[in-house]
Image (cartoon, rainbow, N blue to C red):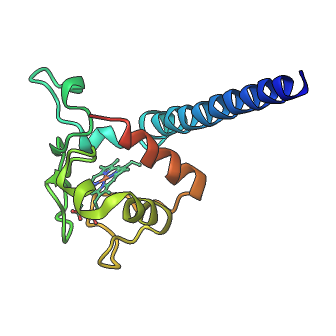
Amino acid sequence: MFANSLRLGALIWGVSGALTLGWAAGDAVERGRYLVEEVAKCYDCHTPRTENGEMDRTRWLKGAVLHFQPIQPIPGWHKTAPDLTPAGRLFQKWGEENLFKYLTTGLNPAGKPAGPPMPTYKLAPEDARAIVEYLKSLK
Ligand code: HEC
C-alpha cells in the first residue's frame, strides 16, 4: 500500500515535472516569437518579400536581399541579410551558443559587430535565449 502510493507520488511528480519543463520550453519559443516578430522585427530584413511586397511567409527568416538602401552611402553596407533558421549556413557555422553570445554582446564569433544595417543588440540573457529557442523551432 505504502509502496504503491509512493510509486503513484513519484509518477505524479514525474509527469508534472515533464509538463513544467514542456511548458517552460514552449513559453521560451512563444516569447522568442514575440520578440522577433513584435519587438525587434528581424523579419523586416531577414525575410524575402513576394512580388506584391508582402512578407513571404513560406520563407520566413530564410535570408533576403534588402528592400531598401541608404540615401547617402554608408561604409560597409550589406545588401543581403542571412538565413537565420537552423537549416541555414549561419546557424550551422555558429551553433546556438555563438548566436546566444552574439545577441547578448553584439559581437560575432570574430569579435566584431555585424555590418550595417544589422542593428547591434545587447539583449538580456533570457530574451536572447528565447530568440534562439524560437529560431530553433523554425524549419
Ligand atoms: C534593419 C535590418 C535588420 C534587422 C531588423 C535585423 N537584421 Fe540581422 N542582419 C541584417 C544584415 C544586413 C546582416 C548582414 C550583416 C553582416 O553580414 O555583417 C545581418 C546579419 C545578422 C546576423 C549575422 C551577423 C554576422 O556578424 O555575421 C545575425 C545572427 C542576425 N543578423 C540576426 C538577427 C536577429 C536575431 C534579428 C532580430 C532580433 C535581426 N538580425 C534583425 C539586417 C537586419
Q: Is residue 48 left or right of residue 125?
A: left
Q: Residue 16 occupies which quadrant of the picture? A: top right
Q: Classify 78 as above or below 58.
A: below
Q: Is residue 9 left or right of residue 15?
A: right
- Count how many numbered circles sit on residues in the image: 0
Q: Position of residue 128 (x, y in %)?
A: 50, 53
Can you say whether 19 is above or below 79 in the image?
Answer: above
- Front in this rendered view, residue 137 or 17: 17
Residue 104, position in %: x, y? 50, 63
User: Looking at the rendering, in which quadrant would you find the C terminus?
Assistant: top left
Judged from this view, the residue extending furthest toward the right is 2
Quarter of the image that includes the N terminus: top right
The image quadrant that residue 95 belongs to is: bottom left
Picture coordinates of residue 50 (x, y %)? 13, 25
Q: Which residue appears farthest toward the left when viewing the image?
A: 51
Q: Using residue 139 as the reference point, say whether residue 98 is left or right of it.
A: right
Question: What residue is shown at x 37% (from left), y 42% (from top)?
Answer: 135
Residue 77 drawn above or below residue 49: below
81, above or below 7, in the image: below
Q: Is 106 in front, or is 133?
A: 133
Classify residue 44 by image quadrant.
top left
Q: Residue at x 32, y 35 (%)?
A: 138
Give the side of residue 7 with respect to residue 108, left or right: right
Q: Nearer the viewer, residue 24 or 84?
A: 24
- The structure residue drawn at horizontal position 58% and vertical position 58%, both measured from the top left corner, is 125
Is residue 138 at least partly visible in the picture? Answer: yes
The location of residue 126, given as percent across then percent down, is 59, 52
Residue at 25 percent of width and 43 percent of height: 46
